[in-house]
Every structure is written in structure tokens, then in C-alpha cells.
Image (tube, helix red, strand yellow):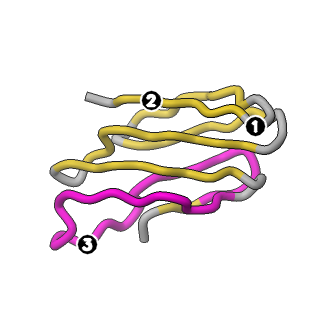
Amino acid sequence: MLIRSRKGYILLLPALPDEWKDGNVRGMKAQGAITVDFEWRDGRIHRVRLCSSCEQKVTLECNGISKTVFLRPDGTEDMIFD
């Protein structure tokens, strides 16, 4: 499983297969009409892009970190995790 979501919450890589050490996805849909693109390296999130068609607050959880993000209509939020 690459993504789990409910309104206002997105968890990335909750159950990544060991064989998928590195990878990326584009255009995944999360609850709240959010489009999610992300890239991972060594099983950890490296880059995330969130796009929303409406204004909303969402909590993104990845790499053991939770971050609250405020999305604007038709805007994007880009994040890099090192």
C-alpha cells in the first residue's frame, strides 16, 4: 500500500513492499479531492507534491513525521524530506 487517506489526513508508504526500495508515483488521489505525487528512496519519502481544487487543511504523515499543510484552491504544495 502506497497511500492511506481520510478527509484531512494523508499517510504515505504505510506498507511498502521490501522489493520497492526506490520509486515514484504521480496522480494518486486522496480524500478531499487531493492529487498526490511523491518519490521515495531507500523506503523513505524524499519529495511530495499536493494539489487541491479547494482550500483545505491536511495533515501529511511520512517518515515518522506529521506536518500540517494549508492547501489553496488550484495551488500546489511542494515538500522535500531529507
Q: Which residues are magenta?
A: 5-30
Identify the amino acid type marked 2. Met
Seen in the picture, residue 56 relative to 4 is either above or below; the reply is above
Identify the residue under disc 2: 79
Identify the amino acid type marked 1. Asp
| Local secondary structure at mark 1 | loop
Residue reaching furthest right? 54
Residue 77 is situated, as x and y percent measured from the top left of the image, at 58, 30
Seen in the picture, residue 19 relative to 33 is either above or below; the reply is below
Identify the residue under disc 1: 74
Q: Earlier in the sequence, mark 2 or mark 1?
A: 1
Q: Nearer the viewer, residue 66 or 25?
A: 25
Q: How many marks?
A: 3
Give the class, few, some or many, for how many residues have Cα within 10 Å of label 3's Cα (few <14, many ≥20). Answer: few
Instruction: Calculate the distance from the C-alpha at mark 3 to the C-alpha at mark 2.
Output: 23 Å
Quadrant holding the C terminus: top left
Q: Earlier in the sequence, mark 1 or mark 3?
A: 3
Instruction: Calculate the distance from the C-alpha at mark 2 to the C-alpha at mark 1.
Output: 17 Å
Identify the residue under disc 3: 17
